[in-house]
Amino acid sequence: MILNALLVIFGYLLGSLSSAIIICRALGLPDPRSQGSGNPGATNVLRVGGKKAAAATLAGDMLKGLVPVLIARAMHADIEIQSAVAVAAFLGHLYPVFFGFRGGKGVATALGVLLGLHWPVGLLTIGTWLVVAYGLRISSLAALTAIFLTPFYIWWLKPEPALLTAMIFMGALLYWRHRSNIVQLIRGTENRIDSQD
């Protein structure tokens, strides 16, 4: 019981490490929370600092979701605890204790935890994001589409109630964090991936 609690706490603390802010500071770039969209995520870092900084941010955000889930699995935690660790890492990214509880929108971290929980579902979700992002060049639409379809991928490939519940919860939070993007999508004013605005 104590070990399970420690795994969940570790997931949250690791998730609280903001890759965007850490990488921008290390590279001498502006704080992503004060530039562009104001979101400390890979898409905004792309606008603020370019492709290399964005790639590093994306990798960092995915890893902080993936690693705690893999550690929980390596310690033979059941799927319920793995799912709880995944949610904790995701919440850490959204509400990081180390950065005033002002975090990102959770897309990359959600992809990381999905890869850890069940990699085929993770790959399908990433593939969906890539197809929509490449075709339409709108990161938020790609994310919203991919996350919307993920529960169906889980139901198809690994219909575990704990996993499905965790994903629906994360998906609901992710949609909430994207509410301004949804409004802009409806208005037709949402930024494209290559936009500098």
Image (cartoon, grey):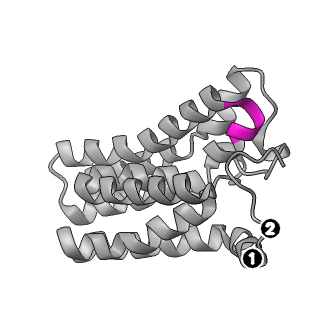
- Residue drawn where x is 79% and y is 50% of the image: 38
Which residue, given by chain and number where applicable, does mark 1 sit on?
A: 183
Seen at 55% across and 33% down, the residue is 55
Residue 22 is marked as none
Give the main secondary structure of the magenta stretch: helix
Q: Is residue 97 left or right of residue 117?
A: right
Residue 152 left/right relative to 18: left
Secondary structure beneath dot 1 equals helix
Residue 58 in the image: above or below residue 5: above
Q: Earlier in the sequence, mark 2 or mark 1?
A: 1
Mark 1 residue type = Val
Q: Image check: 131 left or right of 195?
A: left
Residue placed most toward the observer, 108 or 101: 108
Q: Is residue 74 above or below residue 157?
A: above
Q: Amino acid at mark 2?
A: Thr
Q: Which residue is mark 2?
A: 189
Question: Alpha carbon of mark 2 to alpha carbon of mark 1: how far?
Answer: 9 Å
Residue 5 appears anywhere in the view: no
Residue 30 makes an appearance in the image: yes
Residue 42 at what x, y percent from top left?
62, 43
Magenta stretch bounds = 45-50
